[in-house]
Amino acid sequence: MDAVLLATDGSEYARRAAEQAIEVASDNDADLYVLCVVDRRVHGEPGLSTEELSTIEAEDVGHDCVKEVRSMVGDRAVDVSVEGSVRHGLPQEVIIEYAEEVEADLIVIGEHGDHRQHLGGVGRHLVAESPYEVRVVTLEEP
């Protein structure tokens, strides 16, 4: 295994998924790619209107999610390379596209997302549509 892709939104489920993704990357001496998708169904493209400013805020949250995973890696003192990206689009489509781009061997995602904006089913869509191995992490998993 050379590359693990973590899809995150900063939710508690995503943090649990991050723990597992870091562990898998460390155990396999793999690179860890962290992706946060600004869902176009919730946010349009960035601009200067009040509505579009929420998109910019969502991007900032995405960058914070990537920083949080980098911090988690540092706290564990493991030798894992972390690359991060924030992109716009339909989450399941963007995740699969990014997995192809980084040649991911595994996609790790939390069972549920941030419920304030959650439209549901991203993990379910990935399991059904992705040509990659997908691990959907619950809060109860060890």
Image (cartoon, rainbow, N blue to C red):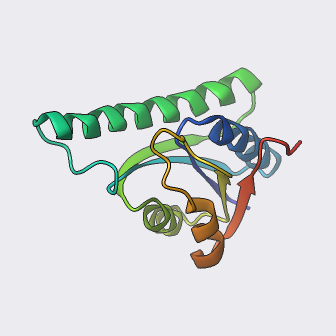
Residue 134 drawn at (x, y percent): 69, 65
Residue at image coords 56%, 61%: 122
92, above or below 83, in the image = below
Farthest top residue in view: 75
Residue at image coords 54%, 41%: 115
The image quadrant of residue 125 is: bottom right
Farthest left residue in view: 48
**Is residue 125 at all visible to an observer of this figure?**
yes
In front here: 11 or 65?
Answer: 11
The image quadrant of residue 128 is: bottom right
In front here: 5 or 17?
Answer: 17
Residue 132 placement, left or right of 84: right
Q: How many marks?
A: 0
**Is residue 131 at all visible to an observer of this figure?**
no
Task: Please state, as top left, top right, bottom left or bottom right, where the N terminus lies in the image.
Answer: bottom right
Residue 133 drawn at (x, y percent): 70, 69
Residue at image coords 66%, 27%: 72
134, above or below 5, in the image = below
Task: Please state, as top left, top right, bottom left or bottom right, where the C terminus lies in the image.
Answer: top right
Residue 139 placement, left or right of 3: right
In front here: 44 or 35?
Answer: 44
Farthest right residue in view: 142
Residue 36 drawn at (x, y percent): 47, 46
The image quadrant of residue 40 is: bottom left
Residue 69 placement, left or right of 42: right
Residue at image coords 71%, 46%: 21
